[in-house]
Amino acid sequence: MNKISPLEFLDSLSDFGIKLGLDKTIYYLEKLGNPHKKFPSVLVAGTNGKGSVCKSLSKILQLSGYKVGLYTSPHLIDVRERIRINEKEIEKEEFIKKIEELRKIIEKQPYHLYPTYFEALTIIAFSYFYDNKIDILVCEVGMGGRFDATNVLPSFLNIITKIGLDHTDFLGKTYKEIANEKSGIIKEKTVVITSKQKDDAYLVIKKKAVEKESKLLTYGIDFKGVLVSILPEKMVFNFYGKERFKELETDLVGTHQIENLSIAIQASLTLKEKGYRIKEENIREGLKNINWPARFQILQKNPYIILDGAHNVDGVKNLMKNVRKIFPDKKFSFLVGILKDKDYKKMVKIFEKYTDRIIFTKPNSDRAIEPEILKNILGNRKKVEIIENPSEAYKYIKKTGKNWLIFGSLYLASDILT
């Protein structure tokens, strides 16, 4: 492996697949001096919305004057997007330097002790954040929680966004089982903020918080957001909690985002109680301008082409609801590409009734499902086409003069943005 470049070495770790567990991450971080223990951290788990919470919370903290590390996944175009300080992604030279630093340690180990791609990235990120003396880290869990590499963090604020039935091969088949994995991020005597959950999931989170002697704050009980107005590029809502904020504006559009943004606000208020200097103006400004690609992103107007990262059942339900609410008088055609490890049959059954025309494509991923399989689910009931190459599909829909909605996978979003 010595002959390959640092980036090729990192990519080669993808061959080790997905392996849930903390042992290897802990081992390599110890070799680097345990950098993750030397800054405060907020850890965000969940099925949908965790990226939006991380992005908005980090922006509020940045505008409050803090040097904020942000670790998210997956990336859309460049892997360095995952590792940011005050919204600026890690420089390529620094990234390569960090890969080489870790590589020297890895290559001394037998193959079975090599970290996975995600574990390696997590180790690199935490080391980079320490080197750059961040004030606080806002970190998105990769998958699950209990055995996710990010859970090595001694996080003092733990957030669990909406839990859905996703990654069921790894996390369990029921809300209860998945909630058990997600709630594994809860640490002793910390604060936990959760979305409104299914009863089975909520009971697990509540029990875990009690066991850990942690304070639990729940959306819809301890705080909430209420929609005031929504347009294609702007949304206004009110926040009600210990503090109240009226007429909050945001360009992160979607009724489901009210819950995510309210969680970010509640997290900010919790941090304020712990001594962080956060003002109302920081919260307002932080929510107003959130550059978060593939979240109801308008690529073109008149006609509209909208790109969204909805990639599971709940995501598709939210997307359909938002399109109807924001564009009650417009018809949209759909360009869709889905991964085979998702509940694609249910996803298709949800969105098929909202359009007369669908084009299925194949995202650039080994996990992508063949468009023909998706087409066969619909039989002959719809005007359905296949354009396998996402780039060609996008060029085609731009020429139609129709309104289009592109969704189904973040890999597809990456293909379109690229």
Image: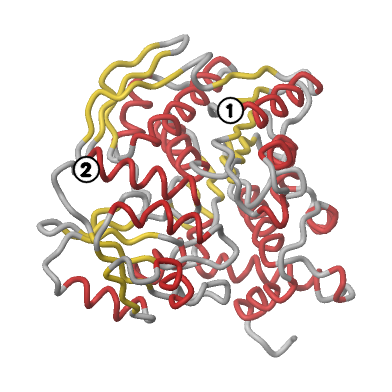
**Mark 1 residue crowding within 10 angstroms, few (<14) / some (14–19) / many (20+):** many
Image location (x, y in percent) of residue 72: 54, 51
**Mark 2 residue crowding within 10 angstroms, few (<14) / some (14–19) / many (20+):** some
Residue that badge 1 annotates: 194
Residue drawn at x 62%, y 81% is 8
Residue drawn at x 67%, y 53% is 168
For the C terminus, the image quarter is: bottom left
Of the pair 397 and 193, the residue shown nearer to us: 397
Of the pair 42 and 222, the residue shown nearer to us: 222
Q: Is residue 120 above or below residue 222?
A: below
Residue that badge 2 annotates: 233
Cα–Cα span, label 1 and label 2: 27 Å
Q: Is residue 24 left or right of residue 366?
A: right
Q: Is residue 15 left or right of residue 405?
A: right
Of the pair 222 and 69, the residue shown nearer to us: 222
For the N terminus, the image quarter is: bottom right
Residue drawn at x 78%, y 18% is 213
Compare marks 1 and 2 and give the one earlier in the sequence: 1
